[in-house]
Amino acid sequence: MSKNFPDIVWHGPSGEIIACFEKNKVMRENLIEIQRTCQDALEDAVLMGCDEHQFRAALTELVASLANPYSPLHS
């Protein structure tokens, strides 16, 4: 993964380890892509004069607001 991320051992909802190589590869690739996109957006925000802490707070809110469309709570 990226130098900023340790290898993550992913778990399913029941605590079982996700051992499938392809699933772990997709998760790793997704996190690297998200990191690159967030890094680019942070750099843009700072270059445009935005407060770094406010931008980071906005990202935190964005992640917290993500909905799981597969959750029984959303059906």
Image (spheres, rainbow, N blue to C red):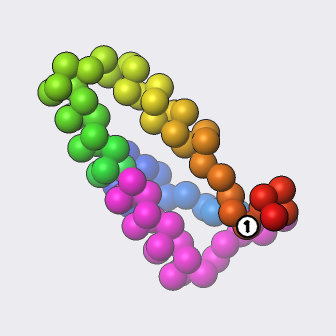
Above-or-below relation of 10 to 34: below
Going by the image, does 7 lie left or right of 38? right
Residue 51 picture location, percent across and down: 30, 17
* Quadrant of the drawing holding the N terminus: bottom left
Left or right? Give the position of 62 relative to 35. Answer: right
55 over 33 or under it: above or below: above
- Type of amino acid at the residue the image marks with label 1: Tyr
How busy is the neighbourhood of tag 1: few (under 14 within 10 Å), some, or many (20 plus)? few
Q: Residue at x 41, y 28 (%)?
A: 56
Check if residue 24 falls in the magenta segment: yes
Instruction: List the residue tagged with mark 1.
Output: 70
The main secondary structure of the magenta stretch is: helix
x then y, percent, for residue 32: 37, 58
Q: Is residue 15 visible?
A: no
Magenta-drawn segment: 12-34
Task: Tell me which residue sits at (65%, 52%) in the image.
Answer: 67
Q: Residue visible at 28% across and 34% down?
A: 42
52 relative position to 6: left or right: left
x 83%, y 56%: residue: 73
Quadrant in which residue 10 is drawn: bottom right
